[in-house]
Image (cartoon, rainbow, N blue to C red):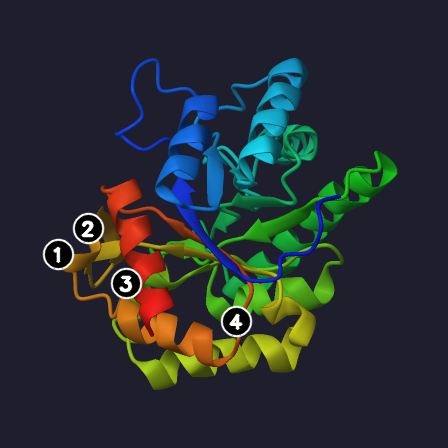
Amino acid sequence: MAAPLTRLLFGTGGVPETVPPPRTTEGAIERLRQVGLGAMEVEFVRRVAMGPAAARAVARVADKAGVRLSVHAPYAVNLNAKEPEKVRASQDRLLLAARIAHLLGAETVNFHPAFYLNGDPRQVYQVVKVRLQEVVRQLRQDRISVRLRPEIMGKHSQFGTFEELLSLAQDVEGVLPTLDVAHWHARTGRVNSYDEFEDMLRQVERRLGRAALDDMHFHCSGIKYSKAGELSHLKLKESDFNYVDFLRAVKALEVKGMVICESPDLEGDALLLQQTYLEL
């Protein structure tokens, strides 16, 4: 297992457009090293398109470059699916993503947990919790020591409120939240001020302990939204997301971990976030 993070690292969710063809993960890691970013989320959004040998090779490149990795599991995960075969497929996607993350030297697997499917959110929570516990139990049996991180989701139809994720982290060992602050802003229409960002972080500390603030994972981007929630990601400066106050709150509480940029300008906005943070 990699050494604990001693500071906040900034990076990209996926391979930046500035990486020359064939735009490989290894090329992206080298590019991030060149521009001074310290993290990257390996995106398996459609499928886990990397085998064990390739994962070990990427891990060596990342270790040499000093770039820390996380993983995003495929989007096709719904732990509240009605059909048993879809539940099992969702769990299998998480397990495979975690096994490859382990070989990559990544300690975090982010994922979109579920849809409500018009169900009662309280009942959906119990279903998601039990099915996530099954995944964690299998990983423990396989001695795969990665953290599963369900992320805050941006649409009202999606399971993944801030409260639901805090509760999952309390109820399921080995689970911590990914705070997608842009998604939460889109979903609530608020949570865009220093006081609100600080309150979120204080709630994490109260519910999960100081250790959680020393091991945070954030997703950041601009966001276009409607009454239904998230519509699309935007560049930071083309949105109303108050990223300066978000970073100010993170710095005030001395949060450690990763800030992963998911805007359309991955590299440029990741560097903007990092530079803004360093200048505060």
Q: What separation in Å lies between label 1 and label 2 (alpha carbons)?
A: 5 Å
Q: What separation in Å lies between label 3 and label 4 (alpha carbons)?
A: 16 Å
Tag 1–tag 2 contact (CB < 8 Å): yes
For label 4, the residue is 163
Visible residue check, residue 90: no
**Mark nearer the N terminus (3 vs 4):** 4
Q: Position of residue 33 (x, y in %)?
A: 44, 37
- Which residue occupies the extreme left position in the image? 238
**Mark nearer the N terminus (2 vs 3):** 3
- 41 or 73: nearer the eye? 41
Q: Residue at x 28, y 71 (%)?
A: 244
Q: What separation in Å lies between label 2 and label 3 (alpha carbons)?
A: 15 Å
Mark 2: few, some, or many residues within 10 Å (few <14, many ≥20)?
Answer: many
- Say which element carries label 2: loop
Q: Residue 235 carries which label?
A: 2
For label 1, the residue is 238
**Mark nearer the N terminus (4 vs 1):** 4
**Compared to 175, does 251 lie above or below?**
below
- Say which element carries label 3: helix
Q: What separation in Å lies between label 4 and label 1 (alpha carbons)?
A: 29 Å
